[in-house]
Amino acid sequence: MKWTETTASDCRYGDVAEEIWGDWDILWEKSENNYQGSVAFVARKGGRYCCFEYDYGSCTGCDYWEDKCSTYSEIEQDMRDSAEWFDDLGVFLKFCDMKMEPGYGEDRKTIGYYVRTAL
């Protein structure tokens, strides 16, 4: 799916993330768009892959970037620096296999399961 089709695009700082991943294919996403929320996704562009996640709040007490009085460009750089980047599909899939889909019970699957389905 395209960035504009994700829940993440409507979340706080979604416009900043769009500057980085706006033209990438989103292979998997798990985001919550509320006054406080979380964003997690896996993206692909050409032979490059990326995993990124962040939480956000509605005030300085619960939002890391707002608490730091971060500028737009500082947030964008922090996103780039804290994302996991891969140029090798095999290494990327091993990484995804270590990350679990949020949920309960024995039916939890790795993010790698969903990524393989999307490839």
Image (spheres, grey):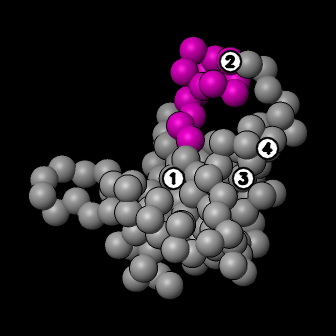
Provide the secondary structure element on which disc 1 rests: strand
Of the residues under marks 1 and 4, which one precedes in the sequence? 1
Q: CA distance from mark 2 to mark 3?
A: 19 Å
Q: Residue at x 27, y 64 (%)?
A: 109
Q: CA distance from mark 1 to mark 4?
A: 16 Å
Residue 8 is left or right of residue 32, and the answer is: right
Part of the protein shown in magenta: 54-67
Q: Is residue 56 magenta?
A: yes
Q: CA distance from mark 3 to mark 4?
A: 7 Å
List the residue tagged with mark 3. 17
Disc 2 marks which amino acid?
Answer: Asp
x, y percent for residue 30: 44, 57
Disc 1 marks which amino acid?
Answer: Ala
User: Badge 2, how many Cα within 10 Å: few under 14, some, many 20+?
Assistant: few
Indicate which label's residue lies in the foreground, 2 or 4: 4
Q: Is residue 93 magenta?
A: no
Q: CA distance from mark 1 to mark 2?
A: 21 Å
List the residue tagged with mark 1. 40
Of the residues under marks 3 and 1, which one precedes in the sequence? 3
Of the residues under marks 1 and 2, which one precedes in the sequence? 1
x, y percent for residue 119: 50, 84
Indicate which label's residue lies in the foreground, 1 or 2: 1
Provide the secondary structure element on which disc 2 rests: helix
Q: Is residue 73 above or below residue 97?
A: above
Q: Is residue 33 visible?
A: no
| Res. 67 mark | 2
| Res. 76 mark | 4
